[in-house]
Amino acid sequence: MPDDLLWRKKEQFRQGTGMDEVLREHFGATVTDEDLDRERDVIDPPLRTREELAYYRMFAEPLPGVRAQGTVGRFVEA
């Protein structure tokens, strides 16, 4: 691999790829508005979007007892 590619500055995944919208739609489709209303307060601060709830479930369900606090959706504004 060329050095300029290997050692280039890191970029956020979502910048310019269009994947943010694809992922939002995909994971948002797995959660209903009713699910979000019922489960938004499972962590503090509360989950803000259906996408965040889908990601939260990906962490919480296979890892019972492990706190997902601070792992889901806290770095990007919805």
Image (cartoon, rainbow, N blue to C red):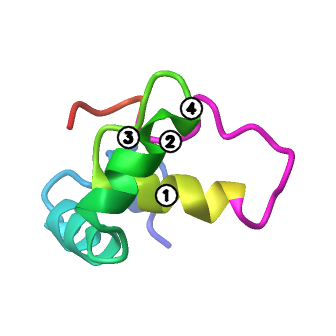
Q: Which label was assigned to residue 8?
A: none
Choose mark 1 or mark 3, whichever is in front. 1
Question: The residue tagged with tag 1: helix, strand or loop?
Answer: helix
Give the camera-side residue of 34 and 3.
34
Chain-order first, disc 4 or disc 1 = 4
Query: In the rendered structure, which amino acid carries the disc numbered 2?
Result: Val
In the rendered structure, are the residues bearing label 1 and label 3 in contact, judged by CB atoms less than 8 Å apart? no
Image: magenta residue range: 61-73
Compute the Cα span from label 4 to label 1: 13 Å
Q: Residue at x 45, y 62 (%)?
A: 54
Mark 4 vs 3, N-terminal side: 3
Measured Cα–Cα span from mark 2 to mark 3: 25 Å
Asked if the stretch drawn in magenta spans residue 69, the answer is yes
- Examine the image and state in which quarter residue 67 appears: top right
Classed neighbour count for the residue bearing mark 4: other residues with Cα under 10 Å, few (<14), some (14–19), many (≥20): some
> Are there few (<14), some (14-19), or many (20+) residues within 10 Å of tag 1?
some
User: Which label was assigned to residue 55?
Assistant: 1
Q: As drawn, which residue projects farthest toward the right?
A: 65
Answer whether residue 66 is visible to the viewer in this image: yes
SS for dot 2: loop
Viewer-side residue, 52 vs 40: 40
Q: Are marks 2 and 1 in contact (CB under 8 Å)?
A: yes
Q: Badge 2: few (under 14), some or many (20 or more) residues near its Cα, within 10 Å?
A: some
- In the rendered view of the protein, which quadrant contains the C terminus? top left
